[in-house]
Image (cartoon, rainbow, N blue to C red):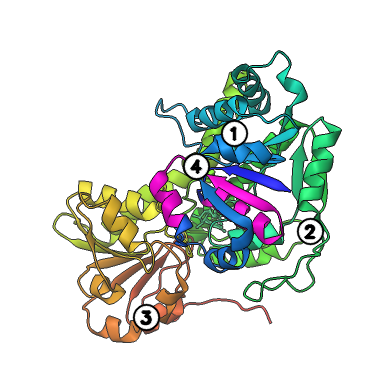
Amino acid sequence: MNIVIFGTGYVGLTTGTALAYLGHLVTCVDIDEKKIAALRGGSVPIFEPSLGELMKLARENLSFSTRPEEALQDADVVFLAVGTPSSANGHGQADLSAVCAAATSIGENLRDGFTVVVNKSTVPIGSGNWVESIIADAHSSEDPHRLFTVASNPEFLREGTAIRDILYPDRVVVGSANPAAQAILRELYQPILDQSFEAPLFLPRPKGMSLAPFIATDVASAELIKYASNAFLSVKISFINEIGALAERVGADVTQIALGMGLDSRIGPHFLQAGLGWGGSCFGKDSAALVATAQEYGLEMPIVTAARSINYDLREEVVRRLLGELKILKGRTIGILGLAFKPNTDDLRDAPALDIAERLIERGARVRAHDPVALPNARAKYADSGIHFCDTPEDVVLHSSAVVLATDWPQYRELPWSLLGSSLSDPVILDGRNFLGGDAMAAAGFRYIGLGCQPRDGRPLQRGYVA
Ligand code: UGA
């Protein structure tokens, strides 16, 4: 099939590349000429494991353009994958100006055949109808609706594992009342639904994976499935963090609780890692947009609202903990390990690390920080933040009164902690992801503080064991 994708961000580029790999002819369109030139030259503008390799394998089917009027002339399916950031009004609604511009361009350039326009960006409930009206208004003919329909096909990819999530999904959801659109999109995804494509060597098919069901539903339900999924995952994380706060008070350990809860197949082990909570471009924005949409209908969303407030208070909680440990923050240096909102990405959007750094600097502390991948991004975007960016994690740890581990990059586990601990007097580590292991850090000479766990300081901890 001929596919056009509007937007070459995480969603557009990974989706376009995966569809090209499956054999579709894909044109990725973006208004950013520099980015398109770089993509044409073979460079990959984002850090996303497997993306570069897959782009190489798919290159014959993949092209890049700044000219939608040309690309749209052959398109069977057009995906809208442009950004929908939170709008500047502070009320949580998504800013849909990029969606509007792309839809207008689609309407102006609709070809004579039938085109399925797919909302892939996370857009507010009702956007299917809205996009349809923009396309129809922008088209010159009397009856544009015979030429196109708008479907919803939400993405469920995670940064860092986006390609894997697209090729080996849990489900494919398509919202459309139009049987032709449902059939076209089912055909588009058929190689994924029946796993008939050759798995790339660098990303083998997971052993024992089940085939993904195809959920054919109406547009509003598809749109809400996306919001509800992200909100549920956000709630799950905030729930375990709420339990963590109590665990600490009663002398329990939240990592043990998550293990014990997660083994219940009705609960599941995922998204129960307590710590600094969620960041990134999705959970914060989407939970705010969900609450804002509900308010338009006179509904409160108390569970989602509480999850948000628990999440964002964790960032202040880190500052409270550091105050409790160090007593004085003014003039002290605090180290931060990890800047990206999670490992395996260089994405800094809504990253807890940066929020914490800002709060510490406001209180007169100095901040040194490192990230294995996001450092260039951080240096470019936060040059005036007052954060001292360090090239090595050792340079952070050795010059700080206390260190906060903000992102659970695996390489931080491998640091020479004993050597670092013995070079410092009274070193403190606040493990914001409960990742480094309290016993190991205490043995390395650190005063260890986890979130939802008991502090360790080298003395043995009384604990029961499950055989
Ligand atoms: C999330 C969803 O997981 C995807 O399904 C969805 O498609 C995507 O948003 C989106 O809407 O585009 P993503 O934000 O890339 O994906 O990353 P996640 O792996 O979900 O992590 C989000 C945040 O939650 C990270 O900051 C992570 O550190 C935190 N987290 C995750 C926890 O604090 N605890 C956990 O147990 C799991």
State how far apart marks 1 and 3 are (Cα): 42 Å
Asked if disc 3 and disc 4 are in contact, CB closer than 8 Å, the reply is no
Query: Which residue is tagged 2?
Result: 191
- Toward the viewer: 340 or 271? 340
Residue receiving disc 3? 415
Per the image, the residue denoted by label 1 is 123
Which residue is denoted by mark 4 in the rendering?
A: 284
Classify 10 Å Cα crowding around label 1: few (below 14), some (14-19), many (20 and above): many
* Percent coordinates x, y for residue 352 in the rendering: 40, 52
Q: Amino acid at mark 3?
A: Leu
Helix, strand or loop for disc 4: helix
Q: Nearer the viewer, mark 4 or mark 1?
A: 1
Question: Magenta residues?
Answer: 10-39
Please, what is the three-letter code of the amino acid marked with disc 2?
Pro
Where in the figure is residue 120, as x and y percent of width and height? 63, 41
- Please determine whether, in this image, residue 443 is positioned above or below residue 24: below
Secondary structure, mark 2, is helix
